[in-house]
Amino acid sequence: MTTNFATFGNELYTGKRSYNFVASKKIWFLIAAVAVALSILLPVAKGGFNLGIEFRGGSEFTVSNVKTTDAVLGEKAVTDVVEGSIPRVANVAGTTMRIQTDKLTDDETLRIKEGLTTAYGVTDNEVTSTFVGPTWGADVTKQALLGLVIFVVIAAVLMALYFRTWKMSLSALVGMLVTMFVTAGVYALSDFEVTPSAIIGFLTVLSYSLYDTVVVFDKIRENTADIDASTRRTFAEEVNLAVNQTLVRSINTMMVAILPVGAILFIGAGLLGAGTLRDLSLALFVGILIGTAATIFIAAPLYAWLRQGEPLLVKQAERVERRRVEVAAKAAAAPESAPA
Amino acid sequence: MARTGPKNSALRVLVWLGVILAVMTAVLAGGTVAGQASWAPKLALDLEGGTQMILAPKVEGGSDINEDQLNQAVAIIRQRVDGSGVAEAEISTQSGRNVVVSLPGTPSKETRALIQASADMNFRPVLQAGAGAAVPTESLTPDDQLPKPTAEPTNSSDINWVTPEVYKKFETLDCDNPSQDKQERSDPAKPLVTCEPATETSPAIKYILGPVEVKGSNIKSSSFQLQQGAQGAVTNEWAVNIQFDEQGTAKFKEVTERLYQFFVAAGGETGSDPKAQFAIVLDDQVISAPRSLAVITDGRPQITGGFTEESAKALSDQLRFGALPISFDIQSEQQISATLGGEQLKMGLLAGVIGLLLVVVYSLFQYRALGLVTIFSLVVAGALTYLAIAILGWTENYRLSLAGVAGLIVAIGQTADSFIVYFERIRDELREGRGLVSAVENGWKRAKRTVLASKAVNLLAALVLYFVAVGNVRGFAFTLGLTAIADLIVVFMFTHPTLRLLARTKFFGEGHRFSGLDPKRLGAVPLYRGAGRLRTPDEKPSVVRAKNTGAAAEAERRMTIAERRLAEKQEQLAGSSKSTSKEGK
């Protein structure tokens, strides 16, 4: 297997084996467009994101003079009434339990109150409920968005300076946007609650996506540095070769990044029942997969497409073609004379 | 080997890395011995629990707080808490009336004061100043000699504001032993008699102040810095800068125009007319009363004189966070346990460990012995990060939340990527036919650029989000930046020097088949092929579209090298002519 993978790497490097990421761009763009459209439409059809208590506020129960401070009892009292919710249970000042849940109806509030009374062995008037506001308020969102916009603008400028072309910045940002939309769409479909951890996950994905693109683009920059002097490959082919040459790296990096996240998502949240980590790990798992793919299938082909119309590159492509015709003519004239 | 050879320089870098690790360990050990730091990283609210404070806001004038004000209060408290480190406090509202602040650990006295600090700030001109002690009863001014207003006051500096009642209050006020009773908020339109509490360097002073001229909400920002001297050189004097908004600028210009006249009339620098002073009043107490040494027209006054770095920072913070006309009473303060079930966290971490083992297996599988370099590099990165987190927990109150832990796990992927990029470049160089030693040097030159460029993206994200965002996002940015730096240190100071050394060993240098750098396995084409023939660039195979790749690969394995080259060449020619004819339509 390793041998095969190494051979696979060699062939990708020499160009003997090549996947046509760039030439088949129309298919990838179409798939991406459909995926992005679905990622916008489906959550809207479903009624938006399932925002957690941190964003919308919710109900808070306070149970005083509890006999036991076992948090699981409180969690169960809530999930028995509202299935699938993730209550936040904490012990306050010794014998008081604080249970926070999403917004509840009056009926649910009453039933959970009863449940908590029996679970913690207290009397009716020792359970009180109140409304709590969001911990992730509008001010946090505002500042985070502002930070993101500033980051993206500076990153775009820096990339344009480093790569000496704004077209790479644009392609990288488009790839990042596709990643963000699709990741958010998948998350909305999963119906997991959106928590601050999930938002942190999205931010991680965002930086991972740009990071991954820069690594691949740097190889493209290297390969296309002397494109003017070369008649071996057209610009698009050179970009495609770079993507192929870094394919082994892309796969390896993705695997190394995704193995721990996948373990947390599937083994941790799925089998062991660690519900608190599943939101974060889902966002990361989907984001890393999509981010890696978006670099290969969207960002790189888009960059080739943006540049191939440039007069210099059109001329270069013509030279490549002329040379190929010459070589083909030579080969046809003397097919047997290849040196041994 | 020469003394300055690559082997020695590689060793030197490794020694430096050892020094960095040793220094960090020593710092942490010192802190632990001194009882201020601990070997374990500090944990955030969700993992460790902390203190929950319920704050009841008090609004100027005693009216009920509205939703806007409450949200503003939450934002300001968040700013204050964030300003004291990266502790990721949780701040929310309760019942639409109270603010609930949950902090990890036990908040220090300073933190508590900062949160509670009311923030009714304004600027008033000084009418009269005096020593802090109360005037003894026997020497009180007799009633008939009390100053009497002769006319309606025309501006805030007008001495006619001082009525007999005001003056009596001023004389009896004792600033050396201030009463702890909370008093009603003062009326901004009336004069105020109040104290400037004693500090370490100056005794208490009492003042009669005119009505409010500029409100704290007119302050746009505030900072502190070392004062610039006449030649633009930095002096040793600390200064606090204020920037007013448009309205504040206009008002402050008017005030300083008036105050500057008093300053000049009293004889400039040597004069001592209190009316040249304006008082910065916070919660009805004077925090500073500088003289107006010039007319400030641009809304950017600078306060100087006798500041230490701490007192300058304190005043600047008070000015910056002071624009909230609400103060808070702590209604209750209670211990609160972790909000995440300990059992669940353990399960999550167990899953993370399983994931890490999978990474180890995958690395060994992909890179053979080279995988060990990856694993050791990750271990070094882990050690660096751990030490950094423990030290920052001590100095910056950095606390690890669940999201932070997950961020660290993801960082493994990005850290490993630096090595993967590097290894793949080395392999590329080997494929070009270089020897391992030069492949490592050349591969590094190319990989270095890529690694630096891509890590710059992460560092940029970390920096921007750290300075702009608040709350959880700020904590995330901190973790992201931390891991990116640890990653750079490791790849430059551990992975690369290690590979340089390994490239000179027999096992790697001769390309043992388990080394992960076996040229044969990598299909290397030697630059020199014997019989006096060198490979020309044209011979490098280019893009080929084989119709039956499976069969072709199988057949190819059965060919000798010479046969394979021949076949490749023919295929290449055929392939390119085919593609030309296709595209040449």
Image (cartoon, coloured by chain):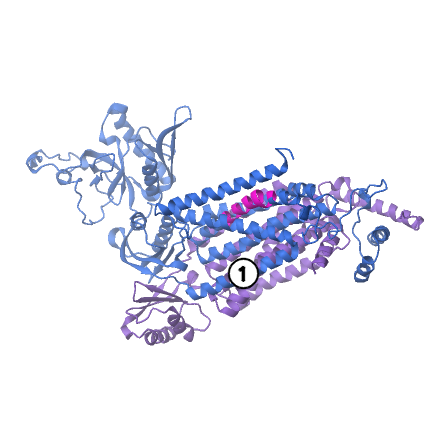
Report helix, strand or loop for mark 1. Answer: helix
User: Per the image, is B279 magenta?
Assistant: no
Instruction: Give left or right: position of B131 versus B118.
Output: left
Which residues make up the magenta segment? B480-497
Q: Chain of mark 1?
A: A
Identify which residue is drawn at 59% across, 54% down.
Answer: A177
**What is the drawing colour of chain B?**
blue
* Magenta span main SS: helix
The answer to whether residue B489 is magenta is yes
Label 1 crowding class (10 Å Cα cut-off): few <14, some 14-19, many 20+? many
Left or right: residue B144 versus residue B583 is left
What residue does disc 1 label? A283
Q: Position of residue A175 (x, y in %)?
A: 62, 53
Residue A44 at least partly seen: no
Q: Residue at x 80, y 56 (%)?
A: B545
Query: What amino acid type should be assigned to the residue bearing mark 1?
Result: Ala
The residue lying at 36 percent from left, 48 percent from top is B80
Q: Nearer the viewer, residue B373 or B171?
A: B373
Give the image location of residue B572, x and y in percent. 83, 51
Left or right: B241, with A274 as reference point: left
Residue at position x 83%, y 52% from top? B561
Image quadrant in which you'd find residue B56: bottom left
The percent position of residue B281, horizontal first and vertical second, equals 27, 41
> Is residue B274 something that shows in the picture?
yes
B23 or B222: nearer the viewer: B23
Residue B403's spot in the image, x, y percent?
47, 57
- Between residues B203 and B389, which one lies in front from this camera angle? B389
Between residue B545 and residue B50, name the one nearer to us. B50
Q: Is residue B152 above or below residue B58?
A: above
Quadrant of the image for the N terminus of chain A? bottom right
Name the image quarter holding residue A297: bottom right
Chain A shade = purple
